[in-house]
Image (tube, rainbow, N blue to C red):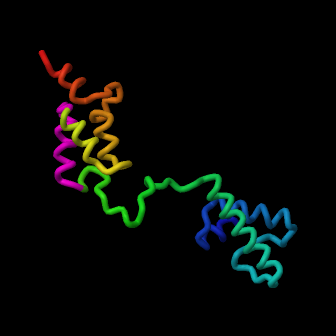
Amino acid sequence: MVQGFVEMGLSNSIAQCVVGWSDRLELAPVDPAQERDAAEQLLIDEAIESCTTADALVNPPEQDPERLAFDDQPYAFGDDLELDVLWTQCELGDGQACDDLWEQAPVGSEYESFGVTCGQRLDLLNCTEELADTDSP
C-alpha cells in the first residue's frame, strides 16, 4: 500500500502517514489504484494534504538566505570584481582590504560578513589595526 503512494510521487513518510490515516478512518486497505466512491476519495485526498502539510512542518526544506527579487546588488564572492579583489586581499591578511570590503559591501551580503569578520577571523574587531600588529616581525 505504501509503495503505491510512493509510486504516485509521495515521499515514503507521507505515504506511511496516509496509510495510517486510512487505518484510523477505518477505510478499506488503501491502494492508490483502487477505485473509491467520492466520499472515500475525498478522505484520501484530505489525508494526503494533511500529511504533506505535517511533513513540511516537521522537515522544512533548507532555504537560501532571503533576497528580494529586485535586489540586484552583489551578494557573494564572484558577483563583483572589485569586491572579489578586496575579499582576496582580506583573506591573505590585508586588514585595510577587510575594512574596505566591509564598508563597500551591500548590507546583509556575504561580502559584508567576510569583511566585518576580517576574513573569518572572528576574534578581531578592527582589521586594519589588528592584522597590522600580527603582520609585523
Q: Residue at x 84, y 72 (%)?
A: 28
In the figure, 83 relative to 27: above or below? above
Identify which residue, 78 or 109, lies in the foreground: 109
Main SS class of the magenta portion in the image: helix
Range covered by the magenta-colored residues? 80-95
Residue 63 drawn at (x, y percent): 48, 55
The quarter of the picture where residue 100 lies is top left
Query: Does residue 114 appear to the left or right of 95 in the view shown?
Result: right
In the figure, 87 relative to 118: above or below? below
Residue 73 drawn at (x, y percent): 30, 58
Q: Residue at x 84, y 71 (%)?
A: 27
The quarter of the picture where residue 18 lies is bottom right
Q: Residue furthest right?
A: 26
The quarter of the picture where residue 8 lies is bottom right
In the figure, 65 relative to 38: above or below? above
Asked if the stretch drawn in magenta spans residue 81, the answer is yes
Q: Residue at x 81, y 84 (%)?
A: 37
Task: Give the number of marks.
Answer: 0
Identify which residue, 66 or 103, lies in the foreground: 103
In the figure, 7 relative to 92: above or below? below
Residue 83 drawn at (x, y percent): 21, 48
**Where does the N terminus fall, quadrant-wise?**
bottom right
Residue 45 drawn at (x, y percent): 73, 74
**Where does the C terminus fall, quadrant-wise?**
top left
Identify which residue, 28 or 135, lies in the foreground: 135
Q: Residue at x 27, y 43 (%)?
A: 103
Asked if the stretch drawn in magenta spans residue 57, the answer is no
Q: Residue furthest left?
A: 137
Identify which residue, 83 or 56, lies in the foreground: 83
Q: Residue furthest front?
A: 103
